[in-house]
Amino acid sequence: FSEMFTITTLPDITFGNESDLQFKLEKRIKGRFKEFRPYQDSPVFENIPSGDYQIVARNWFGCTPEVFSEIIQLLGYPKYFTPNGDGFHDTWTLVNIEDQPTALIYIFDRYGKLVIQLYPGDSGWDGTYKGKRMPASEYWFKVEYNEPTDPIMSRSVFTGSFSLIR
């Protein structure tokens, strides 16, 4: 959960060494993986936005086929929103939560009162509670989601905060 990420791959090498490999990053766009960052010698990719990715590794010498990582799901959230009707940052929601249909998102005020519960696919929180505008302040959220790399898809929880700016 962040705005920008760093992805580091740790290849499981059975022969040769890591310096014999190149790595590229592919992003899922409209259901298909497309090149997002071209092949590079470093296994580190920096400044990656939210989305679904896979890493592709290949041998410099071309003596082995490309190897694909598991899907890496990066969820993000905006640090602030400004519900003023100008069409920019008017609602707050998690970024890239669509592949977590059973996720539950709770937003709390600074006193711990539940303001709203969101679901993946909702349009997001518009900064109101029972039709009234909430004050500019720091708000907290909790998201319950399935851990995608866990074979039994156990539930995980993440909490964070963001600002409502008026």
Image: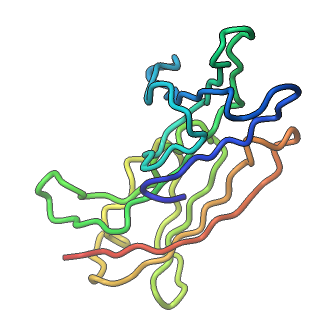
Front one among 72 and 91: 72
Count the marks: how many? 0
Residue 127: where, in percent of width, then height?
A: 31, 69
Front one among 143 and 113: 143
Q: Residue furthest bottom?
A: 111
Q: Is residue 75 above or below residue 36?
A: below
Q: Is residue 137 left or right of residue 141?
A: left
Q: How is the image coloured?
A: rainbow
Picture quadrant of residue 153: top right
Front one among 76 and 112: 76
Residue 131: where, in percent of width, then height?
A: 30, 69
Q: Is residue 36 left or right of residue 137?
A: right
Residue 122: where, in percent of width, then height?
A: 44, 46
Picture quadrant of residue 30: top left
* Residue beneath the point at 51% across and 31% down: 40
Front one among 17 and 95: 17
Q: Residue furthest left?
A: 86
* Residue beneath the point at 68% across and 27% down: 20
Q: Is residue 142 left or right of residue 29?
A: right
Q: Is residue 39 above or below residue 61?
A: below
Residue 115: where, in percent of width, then height?
A: 47, 74
Give the quadrant of the N terminus: bottom right
* Residue beneath the point at 24% across and 57% down: 89
* Residue beneath the point at 22% across and 67% down: 82
Give the quadrant of the C terminus: bottom left
